Amino acid sequence: MFFERGALYMLLLTKSILSLMIGFIAAVIVGLILIPFLKRINFGQRISEYVGESHRKKEGTPTMGGIIFIIPTVLGIAYLVMSGKVEMTYNLGIVLLVFVLYAILGFLDDFLSIKRGKNEGLTVSQKFIGQIIIALLFFAIYMKFNGDTSFVVTTLGINIELGWLYGIFILLFMVWFSNAVNLTDGLDGLSGGLSAIAFVSYALIAFFVGKEDIGIFCFLLVGALAGFLMFNSYPARVFMGDTGSLALGATLAAVAILTRREITLFVVGLVFCVEAFSVMLQVFWYKTKHKRIFLMTPIHHHFEKLGYEEPDIVKGFWLVGIICSVLGIFFAVWI
């Protein structure tokens, strides 16, 4: 038994390392090809007039960089499945579907924004409707192949049957995190690094609950994000755009749902939640009190206004993300 378990762990470790390497190498290759192409066709980011001079200097930096980790992840999974290293399961298929559809939605937003020459792609309502439709599709497929609508916190012994209310929870959950990651994507390397940290956590959680396919997907995506960060870390040569941020947030939510560790994501993804909540709080406070709580939101811009350097803010947020991820794993596995 001991040797069998040891062999299983070694196999998972080998597959995980292979996935990380495939994702990283493929992302670097895609980045080296894509970034010059985006520059050549002038697909550059428009910078808001309300941000500081340090951000104004980033005007024209290529966006849609999420393609750098999306293509390697999709092709990497295809290779692992065709080579027999990973089984193509319902879980893997539905995660890939969410990943790709949210990426397409983000791509449309980025494309329209660039073509119009200003930060106005899809309208808020168009983007929201798109997010809802994809989340509904996810729920429909989930119900067909799984059908479990109970709210579960296994480690605390909580199991409450929600029925159709679970569908509403999935919609709100997926839309919340897709937008939260999107709002976090305002500093070089911030959203990509935090997402990589979160997906490492869920890779380990997936292995713990017996979802090897999801775990391998997460590690492949982490490798691709590491490759992307080679180009996105300060000073960034490319931005992920909505193409990447919407896909990352929604996919995190999908992984959390399929591993039945939904609440854990509020711990692992605490930084994302704080970023989104800071915007909501700022808007509410300004409309009701006609005052601002923060100098600027999302909250990472507040720290910029206080005089902190961009790389220092990113490192600080990454550190908080690592601490939250460790706590999240502990909550998901041992409590």
Image: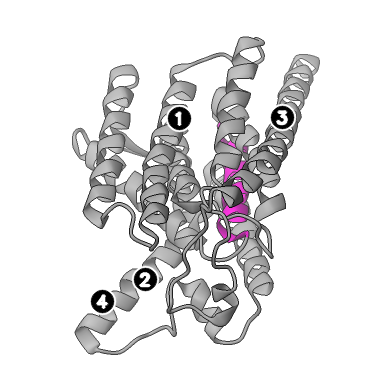
Check the picture and name the quadrant holding the N terminus: top right
Residue behind mark 3 = 22
Label 2 or label 3, whichever lies nearer to me, is 3
- The crowding category of the residue bearing disc 3, from other C-alpha atoms within 10 Å (few below 14, some 14 to 19, many at least 20), is many
Residue behind mark 4 = 284
* Mark pair 2, 3: CA separation: 37 Å
Amino acid of disc 4 = Phe
101 left or right of 204 in image: left
- The crowding category of the residue bearing disc 4, from other C-alpha atoms within 10 Å (few below 14, some 14 to 19, many at least 20), is some
Number of callouts in the render? Answer: 4
Per the image, label 2 sits on a secondary structure element best described as helix
Q: Residue at x 58, y 68 (%)?
A: 58
Q: Residue at x 62, y 50 (%)?
A: 197
Amino acid of disc 2 = Val
The rendered magenta stretch, by its main secondary structure, is classed as helix
* Mark pair 1, 2: CA separation: 28 Å
Which residues make up the magenta segment?
A: 189-206
- Counting residues from the start of the chain, the first of labels 1 and 2 encountered is 1
Q: Which mark is residue 279?
A: 2
* Mark pair 1, 4: CA separation: 34 Å
Question: Is residue 153 visible in the rendered structure shown here?
Answer: no
Question: Is residue 310 visible in the rendered structure shown here?
Answer: yes
Residue behind mark 1 = 95
14 part of magenta stretch: no
Viewer-proximal residue, 147 or 15? Answer: 15
Q: Are marks 1 and 2 in contact (CB under 8 Å)?
A: no
